[in-house]
Amino acid sequence: MDASLKSKIVDAFRALPAGCRYPVASENELAAFEADYAPIPPDFRWFLTTCGGGTVGCDWVDDINQLRDSHHKFNAESSAEGGWTMRDVFVIGWDGSGNPFGIHSPTGKLIVEDHDFGGVHDMAESFTDFLVGRLLS
């Protein structure tokens, strides 16, 4: 993601009402999360340190504190019988219907698992495309 696009995303995100945005993450918070869970994908890491988290279109993207809860919940529910079937995903939030969504490690796509209709579906080609499509369109 180039500097111009980053600037546009930041401006659009900061234009959201304060109640739709969460505080940015510190490097210490990111390192602590990664020590307990997994490396944070680069574009999402940038988002956490620059924007924090909050409303992106109609979805809520976790901040660093919620991210810990989401990974714990997703991991627990994935190991249960009849649980989530998405694999190789770095969960970044839950949609309004309670479905987890995240960055698919092998492809970089943003994916969601739908518990009502079943299946794993693409949301965007990348986290950057997700931000552009929901904040700049």
Image (cartoon, rainbow, N blue to C red):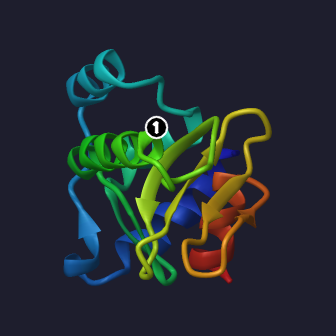
Residue farthest toward the front in the current orientation of the protein: 81
Where residue 87 appears, x then y in whole percent? 63, 40
Q: Looking at the rendering, which quadrant does residue 34 occupy?
A: top left
Where residue 37 appears, x then y in whole percent? 36, 25
Secondary structure under tag 1 reads helix
Q: Looking at the rendering, which quadrant does residue 4 occupy?
A: bottom right
- 121 vs 51, left or right, is right
- 36 vs 45, left or right, is left
Where residue 103 appears, x then y in whole percent? 61, 46
Identify the image quadrant of the C terminus.
bottom right
Within 10 Å of disc 1 (Cα), the crowding (few <14, some 14-19, many 20+) is some
Query: Residue drawn 48% across and 31% down?
Result: 40
Query: Residue drawn 57% across and 65% down?
Result: 8
Q: Which residue position is annotated with label 1?
A: 45
Above or below residue 60? Residue 42 is: above
Query: Residue drawn 42% across and 81% down?
Result: 96
- 14 vs 66, left or right, is right
Disc 1 marks which amino acid? Arg
Where residue 11 appears, x then y in whole percent? 46, 69
